[in-house]
């Protein structure tokens, strides 16, 4: 009979050779440490501690481990010990892993990273007496000055195109709920929201639980399984003066404005941006009171520090005009544009229950935020949002796209960018829409003019219009797409004219 220990060693060997090493998002720079050594026959059934120093201020440790001799049945298992405790054991099933305070690769414990002497623990369940194996351990030590690069190891999809996602989803790590298998209402596990996002044919989703970071451990574990869905870490920073989503950061960020932890909003924003995060104000025009304290945005705000505004939240715009559209963030956003701040408009379902049907307000993917990005990875999606290459799609089943551009004197400027004029004259704009049959475009001009273009009749159709411009006037132009009955279907971000903003500096 084969012993249980022998079976375990065979499984570890099989994993190390073929199966069980999910990709880890290793930093793109060279490692801070490269540890090398050898294992020989006398190391059979022993453990070796490979020591390395971790300086104070380290926020994340990432390891890439490799060894030779597999063809001779050499097996090396892997674990980690910090100066105070054992941090995990992946055996032979992982050659790469990461640990941090907020999230760690499955097999390893998240938590503070104490400075001092750490050890890679190498177990050697098998090496033949005459064999010799060489190992190399590459180690990255990230401090607070290095932005988090994401849960995925490289783009899930390559190439410049429109990617579609939901930027505002809650789970059981805050107030998200769903029905259990026994039909009881429970705090909803993270995987349910991710599964629903896949079913909604989304390319990316941001999990944004209120003031929480505990969800990041689950996201780290689930990203390798959901290898067709980019998972962006987020949280909804919920304060008494408003709510804002913080994307792309896993480190703790204080939210208790008015306390010693975060005296002002500026302190919170400085912390978030210092970590490489993107900040978006949520549902700014909703009423704020006893029913939902802080839901509307009333904070004194340094607007140059805000990158996005959630213009459409869940079901706030579900009909033509009237109260529903008034509760959107459109007017709030346009007020900041008029003041000279080129802030990107985004949408988010604000989903709290992944069981909502696709046609319900606040279902995952209602609305979709579509971004034109260079690839499906965290850096490219957030970069596209920062540059305004964004559409809000309130009718996502049609998967429409809208290419919006301005042209003057041979210079072509895409949506989200600025056109600086040296003299008065006309600017020609183009709008190329897919799947727009039976709809119409309206041009929204910062001068207060709304122009209705002729109805669209073809699956792919382009509309042109020309506007006269004063080279000394700051101005913005954007598009709405409406159904024949007036329902709002899509919102574009603007093309800017003569804006003086650091965002547009070369």
Image (cartoon, rainbow, N blue to C red):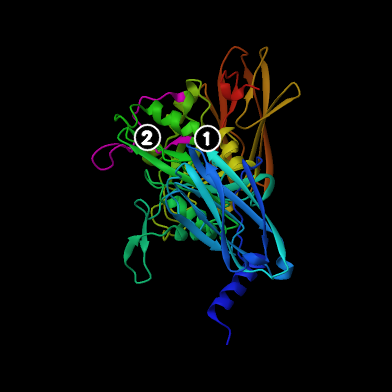
Percent of width and height locating residue 151: 55, 50
* Residue 336 in magenta stretch: no
- The quadrant in which the N terminus is found is bottom right
Position of 327 with respect to 278 (left or right) is left
Tell me the residue that label 2 is attached to: 285
Percent of width and height locating residue 144: 50, 36
Q: Measuring 59% from the left and 50% from the top, which residue is drawn there?
A: 63
Percent of width and height locating residue 400: 61, 47
The answer to whether any part of residue 486 appears in the image is no
The secondary structure type at the circle numbered 2 is loop
- Magenta part of the protein: which range? 279-303
* Between 321 and 95, the one nearer to me in the picture: 95
Position of 30 with respect to 355 (left or right) is right
Above-or-below relation of 448 to 174: above
* Between 23 and 302, the one nearer to me in the picture: 23
Tell me the residue that label 1 is attached to: 276
The secondary structure type at the circle numbered 1 is loop
Image marks 1 and 2: residues in contact by CB distance under 8 Å: no
- The quadrant in which the C terminus is found is top right
Q: Nearer the viewer, mark 1 or mark 2?
A: 1
Q: Measuring 44% from the left and 39% from the top, which residue is drawn there?
A: 245
- Secondary structure mostly seen in magenta is loop
Q: Measuring 42% from the left and 50% from the top, which residue is drawn there?
A: 84
At label 1, counting other C-alpha atoms closer than 10 Å, the crowd grade (few under 14, some 14-19, many 20 or more) is some
Considering every residue shown, the one lying at the far front of the view is 42
Please tell me in which quadrant of the rendered image residue 388 appears. Answer: top right
Position of 258 with respect to 161 (left or right) is left
Considering every residue shown, the one lying at the far left of the view is 290
Above-or-below relation of 388 to 71: above
């Amino acid at each position: 009979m084969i012993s249980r220990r022998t079976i375990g060693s065979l499984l570890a060997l099989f994993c190390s050779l073929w199966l069980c090493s999910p990709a880890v998002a290793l930093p793109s720079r060279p490692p801070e440490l490269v540890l090398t050594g050898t294992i020989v026959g006398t190391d059979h059934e022993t453990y070796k501690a490979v020591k390395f120093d971790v300086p104070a201020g380290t926020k994340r440790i990432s390891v890439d481990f490799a060894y030779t001799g597999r063809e001779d049945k050499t097996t090396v298992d892997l674990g980690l010990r910090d100066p105070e405790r054992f941090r995990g054991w992946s055996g032979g099933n992982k050659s790469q892993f990461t640990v941090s305070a907020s999230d760690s690769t499955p097999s390893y414990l998240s938590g503070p990273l104490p400075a001092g002497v750490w050890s890679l623990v190498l177990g050697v369940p098998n090496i033949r007496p005459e064999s010799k194996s060489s190992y190399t351990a590459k180690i990255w030590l990230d401090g607070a000055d290095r932005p988090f690069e994401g849960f995925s190891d490289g783009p899930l999809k390559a190439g410049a195109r429109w990617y579609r996602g939901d930027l505002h989803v809650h789970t059981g790590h805050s107030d998200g709920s769903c029905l259990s298998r026994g039909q009881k209402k429970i705090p909803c596990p993270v995987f349910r929201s991710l599964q629903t996002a896949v079913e909604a044919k989304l390319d990316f989703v941001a999990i944004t639980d209120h003031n929480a970071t505990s969800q990041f451990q689950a996201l780290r574990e689930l990203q390798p399984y959901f290898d067709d869905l980019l998972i962006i870490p987020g949280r909804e920073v919920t304060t008494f003066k408003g709510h804002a989503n913080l994307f792309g950061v896993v480190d703790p960020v204080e939210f208790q404005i008015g306390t010693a932890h975060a005296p002002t909003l500026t302190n919170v924003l400085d912390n978030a941006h210092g970590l490489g995060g993107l900040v978006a104000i949520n549902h700014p025009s909703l009423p704020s009171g006893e029913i939902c304290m802080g839901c509307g945005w009333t904070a004194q705000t340094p607007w140059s520090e805000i990158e996005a505004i959630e213009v459409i939240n869940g079901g706030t715009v579900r009909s033509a005009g009237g109260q529903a559209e008034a509760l959107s963030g459109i007017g709030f956003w346009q007020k900041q544009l008029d003041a000279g701040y080129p802030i990107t408009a985004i949408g988010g379902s604000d989903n709290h229950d992944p069981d909502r049907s696709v046609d319900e307000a606040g279902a995952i993917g209602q609305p979709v935020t579509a971004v034109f990005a260079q690839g499906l990875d965290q850096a490219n999606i957030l970069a596209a949002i920062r540059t305004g290459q964004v559409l809000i799609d309130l009718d996502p089943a049609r998967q429409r796209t809208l290419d919006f551009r301005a042209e003057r004197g041979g210079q072509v400027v895409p949506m989200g960018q600025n056109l600086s004029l040296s003299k008065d004259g006309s600017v020609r704009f183009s709008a190329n829409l897919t799947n727009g049959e039976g709809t119409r475009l309206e041009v929204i001009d910062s001068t207060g003019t709304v122009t209705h273009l002729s109805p669209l009749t073809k699956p792919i159709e382009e509309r042109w219009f020309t506007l006269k411009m004063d080279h000394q006037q700051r101005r913005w132009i954007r598009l709405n797409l409406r159904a024949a009955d007036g329902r709002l279907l899509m919102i574009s971000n603007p093309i800017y004219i003569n804006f003086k903003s650091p965002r547009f500096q070369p």
